[in-house]
Amino acid sequence: MIFDYTPGNLLVVELDQKKHLSKIYYDYWNADDDTLTPILYGLAKGLVDSIIDREIGSNSRPLIIVETMSDTMYLNAFDKFLQDPNISMNPLNVVPAYNKNSVLPLSIFYRNHGYNTFILLDNDYESRRIAEQLKTNKFSPAQTIFFEREGELLQSIEDYIVIEDYLYAVNQTYEIKLRKEGYTGITKEQVLAQGEKGIVENLNALWIKHDGYWGQFEKEEVCRYICGKIALQETSFLTEKTRNRLRVLYRLIAERIRQYQNLTPKV
């Protein structure tokens, strides 16, 4: 599909049958709003506001773009779980991208409309590539936030959760989902034996070893379980260690917002 928006310039969009808008060529990502807004609806599952005024975000709360809907669910749920007014970001102004290819155009779109835009990223090859693209498009290093703890990059937001706590949710989910396949609770030792960097990567590897009988590990299902339990205030499986780790995440976001605000000239 090709969108023609100015003489001599084209925005080229490759379509994927399953994921709808799969790849954007960013060289011409400065179209007028009549062209951009419907495209952005596809990129963000319809969660992009119909923006006409290019300065509409100037007086708005900082906006955080995340790579997945799971990241959005976790950020909102963990904020309620912590119940810490000193670091609470409620109500969060979070926009989930449809996929990793959507992160950059969404970031540019909101930045160009006056929002203090921050991007929260995993630590994998695609996310690091996104960070380089953001830098090329004149985003400040303070605006690009990788998940990290104690100076160490984390693969995903799930790695803020203590392994045993996360596995409780995994086992509760899959003992029902895979009961016909004879699933039994997996242990921390089984997970770490896979030798991958993050909890999700280790579980993906473990699932693959079961020759397809277990299907594909779905972190979204585990996310729904955890967020649902937080909504019901049934959080006894989440330990104080997990709570403290999550505080680190919200402090990191708050610190980056302060850094950027200090760097931004006051008008």
Image (cartoon, rainbow, N blue to C red):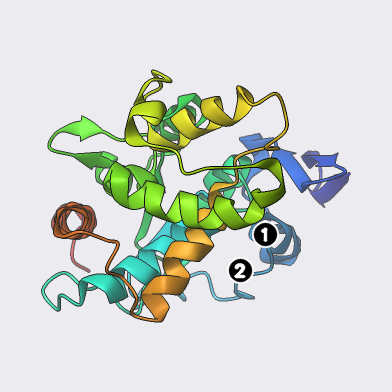
Residue at 47 percent of width and 76 percent of height: 56
Disc 2 on helix, strand or loop?
loop
Disc 1 on helix, strand or loop?
helix
Q: Write down the quadrant of residue 132 in the picture.
A: top left
Side of 147 relative to 40 (left or right)? left
Residue at 32 percent of width and 42 percent of height: 159
Vertical position of residue 192 compared to residue 164: above or below:
above
Q: Position of residue 225 (x, y in %)?
A: 49, 64
Q: Quadrant of the N terminus?
A: top right
Residue at 67 percent of width and 55 percent of height: 43
Q: Position of residue 245 (x, y in %)?
A: 18, 51
Distance, label 1 to label 2, CA atoms, is 6 Å
Amino acid type of the residue tagged 1 in the rendering: Leu
Residue at 84 percent of width and 48 percent of height: 4
Classify 10 Å Cα crowding around label 1: few (below 14), some (14-19), many (20 and above): many
Classify 10 Å Cα crowding around label 2: few (below 14), some (14-19), many (20 and above): many
Side of 68 relative to 50 (left or right)? left
Residue 57 visible (yes or no): no
Residue linked to disc 1: 40
Towards the viewer: 67 or 203: 203
